[in-house]
Image (cartoon, rainbow, N blue to C red):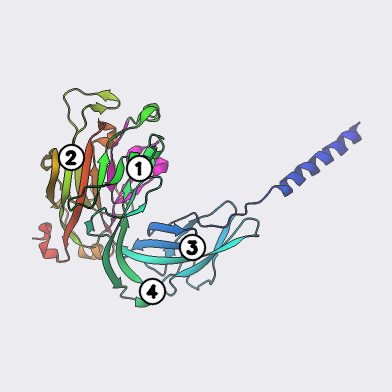
Amino acid sequence: MKLKNLFAGMILCLAVASCIQDEAQNVEAAIDGCSGNDIQQCLIDPNEFTVQLYVSRAADPSKININFDLPTGASIAPVEQLPEDGVNTYNFKDENPRLFKVTSEDNAFSATYTIRLWQTEMPFTYDFETLSSDNPYHKFTEDNPYHKFTEDNPSSGTIIRRLELASGNPGFELTKMAKTPEDYPTVQVNGGVDGGKCVKLETKDTGSFGSMVKMYIAAGNLFIGSFEVGQALSNAMKATHFGFPFFYYPLKLEGWYKYKAGANFSSKGEIIEGKKDKCDIYGVLYETDDNVQFLDGSTSLTSPNIVALARNLDALPETDSWKQFSFNFKPQNGKSIDSNKLEKGIYKLAIVFSSSVDGAKFEGAVGSTLHIDKVVITHTSNPSEYPANQ
């Protein structure tokens, strides 16, 4: 009997081992995403096998950190390894674009991608005429006409002014309340100041899903930065990362708006009688350091790292027609701007628009609607023109 059990056990082990060996390996060979210390934006065309990487103008193109998001088991390597390449660090200074080969887990399939690096500055004007995508929601891109060869190595590429703005639309997608792209809180619409496009921000009900997670409304918002959807449910305020490297002295935040508050103001799901919603528009310049790489919804107006703020809630009354706003950047926390830090990209600037001023706290009125168009960041390269230096 013992011998019979031993043979049975051996057969079972061989069967299990056979199943493991026969399990199909992944056949996908693709780049699903890229992230890194200097990467501000990544655009992938899976049909053309191209990747556009946008980094700050202050980034060192010879040492670009890239963490590739690949299918399970897949691997990636440069077609030509350069001496300066390191662990997840690649040299785009001497070769741009570069070719990278992705190999599937089963080694049967591969794909070669052309990766181009762009060094970018933040645009100064925002007309909201261009979408980089409208599926499943609208994503806004601004591309100001500007090209400048990098000074240290003109052949490596150019500095451009291009930026994709962020919104809370990815978080609203979790509610499954939107049936079309136009149902999201942040959308592009007709009827801008000059008859073109503009952006509409509307505070929305988050339905049963929102009630379950105690996030009862979603304010329409648009901002310079990124939205970390993975943090949206655990800490909504921490999900918004504000700011992009800025290399100038900001003077004014100007543009056009229309605003109508919703009928019923609520706080944490309960209607508050007699209270009216307000919109919010502001610009904030702050200094990064080892502990602060970005501001979020809980620190964007309170951080001691803030250097200058452009905001005036009292200057944003309800209006059915387009009205211009103009807010001066006022020095904060007794800080001035260090020209050396400015050139190194240590300062970041965020521009934030919201249909409900306290929407991040889930306070506001469903239906509150803010339209924004023709936004301009007035700035200077002359330090003597900046208020704190006068």
C-alpha gap between disc 3 and disc 2:
42 Å
Q: CA distance from mark 2 to mark 4?
A: 45 Å
Q: Residue placed at 57% from the left, 59% from the top?
A: 75
- Please tell me whether mark 4 sits on a helix, a strand or a loop: helix
The answer to whether the residues at label 4 and label 1 have Cβ atoms under 8 Å apart is no
Residue 153 visible (yes or no): no
Disc 1, SS: helix
Viewer-proximal residue among 165 and 61: 165
Q: Is residue 179 above or below residue 269?
A: below
| Residue 104 on image: x %, y % | 61, 57
Q: What is the span of residues highlighted in magenta in the rendered image?
A: 217-245
Q: Quadrant of residue 175?
A: top left
User: According to the image, label 1 marks what residue?
Assistant: 169
Q: Residue 159 has which mark?
A: none
Q: Which of marks 3 and 4 precedes in the sequence? A: 3
Mark 2 to mark 1 CA distance (whole Å): 20 Å
Distance (Cα) linking label 3 and label 1:
27 Å
